[in-house]
Image: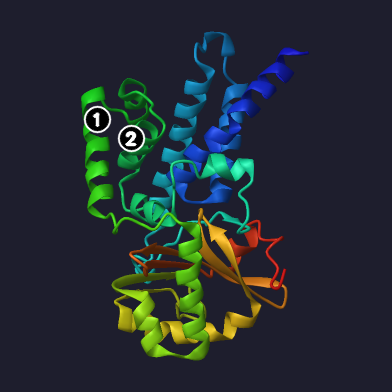
Amino acid sequence: MHDSELLADEFEEHRGRLRAVAYRMLGSLSEAEDAVQETWLKLGRTDVDGIKNLGGWLTTVTGRVCLDMLRSRAARREDPLEPSGTFVPDPVVSPLDRIDPEQEVLLADSVGLALLVVLETLEPAERLAFVLHDMFAVPFDDIAPVVGRNAAATRQLASRARRRVKGAAAPEPERNVVRQREVLGAFLAASRAGDFEALLAVLDPDVVLRADAGALVGGVTVSKLVRGAEAVAGQALTFRRFEASSRLVQVNGEAGVVAIVDGRPQSVMGVTVADGRIVAMYILADPERLARLDLAGEKPGE
């Protein structure tokens, strides 16, 4: 086999891990793929004979690519009309009965939407230090050159990020998927019936709803951040129009629902359940981002 083919095979062995790194860094599946592809291109321009640990080299290069992408993204987000706190990362959607092997790698360590939302609040360098060290065990000595600091300062970046993540932690989420589905099913049934009291019973008093609809439409945005059971229950009554076209799925390994109207996905909703109630809801309704997700198999009624 030619050297280039051997290198390509080695790269493919690491692709799953690199996608996982990039997804945690960017919260975007399409951007994660772009970052991995850029890493492949950089590998092709590098003298591989000088690389002692290919896996480690690829991981740190992917981190560097993602860091540049995050900084570029931050520079573009200057629109004061953009609602704060409504960003919902790209969800990884799978059928209730299985998660394919590639998704298992992508979602290892229970990377739910709640964690990705918190990671979005970190500074790019903090996010890189936390993701590479705490999630992928990359030594600080290897991360330091990427962020342009020494190992001690890089350790501090990760420490600050760790405190932010722990400080934003919700109550311990329900891990039993069957129980998650029961709670979500009760929420959908109450919504369908327009039963306000039943909705309150299944929502945590401090529940937070994030609805990310993307760009402004006609000068008005439908993205929203809603806090509190009564406020969220009032919004939930509007979900009834999607009931006939929705189906339960797994969203980042937790219970969720996809709504499809006229063959097109309208929204993906993931929920976090704790102590028998919904403590957080994440709705992605951005048409452009939904179109890029792999939802071809999620048809209502299947």
Residue at which label 2 appears? 129
How far from the left and from the top, in percent, is residue 192? 53, 86
Q: Where is residue 124 in the image (x, y as percent from the top left)?
A: 35, 43
Quarter of image, res 86: bottom left
Please indicate, yes or no, whether residue 275 appears anywhere in the rendered image.
yes
SS state under label 1 = helix
Mark 1 Cα-neighbour bin, 10 Å: few <14, some 14–19, many ≥20:
many
Q: Which residue is drawn at 55% across and 54% down?
A: 92
Tell me where residue 162 appears, x and y as whole percent: 26, 42
Residue 168 occupies which quadrant of the picture? Answer: bottom left
Q: Is residue 276 above or below residue 100?
A: below
Helix, strand or loop for disc 2: helix
Residue picked out by circle 1: 155
CB of mark 1 within 8 Å of CB of mark 2? Answer: yes
| Quarter of image, res 153 | top left
Q: Looking at numbered disc 1 in the image, what kind of residue is underneath it?
A: Arg
Check disc 2 and give the amino acid type: Ala
C-alpha span from label 1 to label 2: 7 Å
Camera-side residue of 289 and 216: 289
Q: Which residue is drawn at 73% across and 19% down?
A: 5
Residue beneath the point at 35% across and 27% down: 143
Residue at the far top in the pictured view: 49
Q: In the figure, is residue 150 to the left or right of 120?
A: left
- The disc at residue 204 is none
Q: Nearer the viewer, residue 151 or 44?
A: 151
Q: Which of marks 1 and 2 is nearer the N terminus?
A: 2
**Residue 259 percent across, percent down from the top left:** 60, 73
Residue 212 visible at all: no
Q: In this view, does 91 lie to the left or right of 172?
A: right
Q: In which quarter of the image is the N terminus?
A: top right
